[in-house]
Amino acid sequence: MSLQGPQQSSNAAFWFDPDYADFLDAVRRLTPPTATVTLTIPPGELYLFTAAYSLAPRRAVLPDREREASVLAIYGTTIKLPAGTVTRIPQGFLVRR
Amino acid sequence: MIQSAGVPAYCLALVVIWLTGYLVSAAVGQRLSLPERLGWALVIGLLAQSLVFLVLISLGAAGRWQLLISDLLLAVLAICVTRRHGRYMSPGQPPDRSGMILLALAAVGVGVFALQALSRPMWATDYVAIWGLKAKTIFATGTIPSRLFHDPALYWSHPEYPLLLPLSLAATATTAGEWNDRALALLYPAFHLGTLLVLFGFVRRRRGFLPAAIVAGLCGLYFPLYSPVHVGTAEIPLALGLVLLACAALDTLEKATAGVTTRLALASLVCSALKQEGTLFAILLAGTVVLKRRRGRLLAAATLAGPAILHSLIARTAIGRVAGRTFTLAPLSPAKWSDLVDRLNTAIGAIAGLTTARGWVSIAAIAGILWLTQKSFADLLLPPLLVQVGVYVLAASLSALDVAWHVQTSFVRITSALGPALLVVLGVRLGDLPQGLFLRKSQMGNLKASPH
């Protein structure tokens, strides 16, 4: 089934942080639908909920479950990057183990 | 560049679902007016679509064409089985100008809500975190992954919630051929319209055109429920389910034919499969029915409670035990009753703080109508509605999170879903007012006797 319909969740659901939409869109494009993605994101349920929805059917987890993930998505640009293959994406980084 | 099919594809999907439901509902649509048939058709269509989708999922064949072919087969089967059943009931009392104005206002209300719903992708927190997340996952994988119920990382998505809404959303998207969370919002104005049609049809059938038009107008303009913040949540479809349940229960107590009893069972199943609040209402209404000294009350009560309890048991068996983290029962122990009292005070205070001046006026108006009008057969719905609100207050006081926060984020939403069911009571009561209050003398002579 196609998820190719316009991913328009960005504007309405991301009223709290419009840049977050671009970040998640990039994570979605660069990861397979079966991936488990660890998210380093600001605290607050809205960041987690919108990530889980936008990235579905991928599994989105917080850093406390990092060992269950093959990909780390870091939102923001002022953090020390962990080891792995790093890809610069809008508003952050994608790190593949 | 892949062109999105968008709203037209979803319109077509909705037509397929509605048409399939209309044909299937003929088997249980005896004694219903056309507006009621159309309201039932939407719900039965979505229920049938979801059940077919569930079967296809279990066979590993949850694709667009498989679903469309299944719909076609279902429609053909429905035509073959039901062609001997009668037509819908004729409306009886003719329309008048005042009523037509009210219906026009209702249509404006539905239109405004439709524009608001479709103006942006669904964004409500409950949609993103619960219903949409589950629906999108089911749609994208063609399965119902067990992690939706057992993944500790998804504890906040209410894994204990029933699945009819996510299945309906996923099945509709599958029928349309793509996931489009803006076009999918089409379902919500459809739910609004379905609720209005059932309310209007039932009250017109039982009381007359003008009271039916009044409640239709009130439903069309019921902005506490039909607002953009509730698009994507379960409360709007639940409101339709509760109205169907209420109307079917009242019809069953009047005359429990096979068709009417089946409608009651379907409505109970739909309500319980949408949300636990639906199960609660079905059981409360069953309890109220049992206490009435009416013939057929035991059958009606069993039909109300049976599907709701059966659905809960089947879901529990299929999914396994799911830990809910929303509530704590600790304050119910005798040693903690003082804590419970404090929590209740906090909940009641928070509810009072939420109630605006307009809310108090509405409550006073409802109380005034109930005081001024005579008791009617529809008053059966009042005790379960009141108890349901009481349970909501108690549940808020048992919140595992902050009680005031729980009230502020959910009380108005879940309570507003009861409004359309209350309109059934008000519509029937208004129909008992002296005709002279509604009609000019020149119209009195043309008035047909209403069925009841």
Image (cartoon, coloured by chain):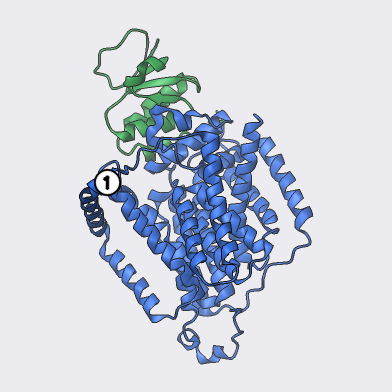
The residue closer to the viewer here, B362 or B163, is B163
Residue B127 in which image quadrant:
top left
- Disc 1: host chain: B
Image quadrant where one finds the C terminus of chain B: bottom right
Shade of chain A as shown in the rendered figure: green
Q: What residue is drawn where x is 49% and y is 67%?
A: B291
Relative placement, left or right, of B66 versus B317 is right
* Vertical position of residue A32 compared to residue B386: above or below: above
- Position of residue B430 measured from the top left corner of the image (x, y, whole percent): 46, 77
B188 lies above or below A63: below
Q: Is residue B117 above or below residue B254?
A: above
Q: Colour of chain B?
A: blue
Residue drawn where x is 36% and y is 25% of the image: A23
Residue A52 visible somewhere in the drawing: yes
Secondary structure of the residue carrying numbered label 1: helix
Where is residue B184? Give x, y as percent: 52, 44
Decide if residue A62 is on the left or right side of residue B127: left
**Residue positioned 27% across, 60% down in the render:** B355
Image quarter in which the N terminus of chain B is found: top right
Q: For mark 1, what is the residue?
A: B331
Residue at 38% x, 49% y: name it: B229
The three-letter code of the residue at mark 1 reads Pro
